[in-house]
Image (cartoon, grey):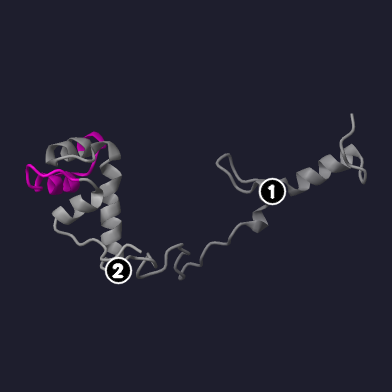
Amino acid sequence: MERGSSKHAPRVDDQMSQEVSGLVQGPGTGGSRVEEFREAEPAGEDQPGATTAPAGDLRTGTPQGMTSQDVEARSRLGRFITMTALPGDRLALIANARENEAPDDLVAALERLPEGTRYQTISEVWAALGHRNETTRW
């Protein structure tokens, strides 16, 4: 059986693949195979640690009429109300949020919704809770 390499012997091919396996596979859940010198050096004692999010506004593409905090809060609401609850009324939304183990503050906010109204989208629920949605979508 041929290995498909005309430059090296099979033993040399195996050795070369082991040499670069740490670069190809990278760090994983089973432990890092990358050489220690390739890992980032930690910050010094008097230096702040590196973060992926800079200070200030974390979203650059916030829609017109909303802040990044509004977007994050509406997204948080949407994580606990699944699409199976929509369209739905106040009781269906509360039941779905509790089923998805929503935090108490979100359940309390949903309990303030008026009875008898059916909501089609999370944006409608968000607006009914007294918040602003984006003014233009595109």
Label for residue 24?
A: 1
Residue 33 appears left or right of 97: right
The amino acid type found where label 2 is placed reads Gln
Residue 61 horizontal/vertical position (percent): 38, 66
Q: Nearer the viewer, residue 34 or 76?
A: 76
Residue 21 horizontal/vertical position (percent): 72, 45
Label for residue 64?
A: 2
Q: Quadrant of the C terminus?
A: bottom left
Residue 123 appears left or right of 59: left
At label 2, counting other C-alpha atoms closer than 10 Å, the crowd grade (few under 14, some 14-19, many 20 or more) is few
Q: Are dots 1 and 2 in contact, CB under 8 Å?
A: no
- Identity of the residue drawn at 91% across and 44% down: 8
Residue 104 included in the magenta stretch of the image:
yes
Instruction: Say which of marks 1 and 2 sits in front.
Output: 2
Residue 44 included in the magenta stretch of the image:
no
The amino acid type found where label 1 is placed reads Val
Residue positioned most to the left: 115
Q: Is residue 12 above or below residue 138?
A: above
Residue 101 horizontal/vertical position (percent): 25, 38
Per the image, label 2 sits on a secondary structure element best described as loop
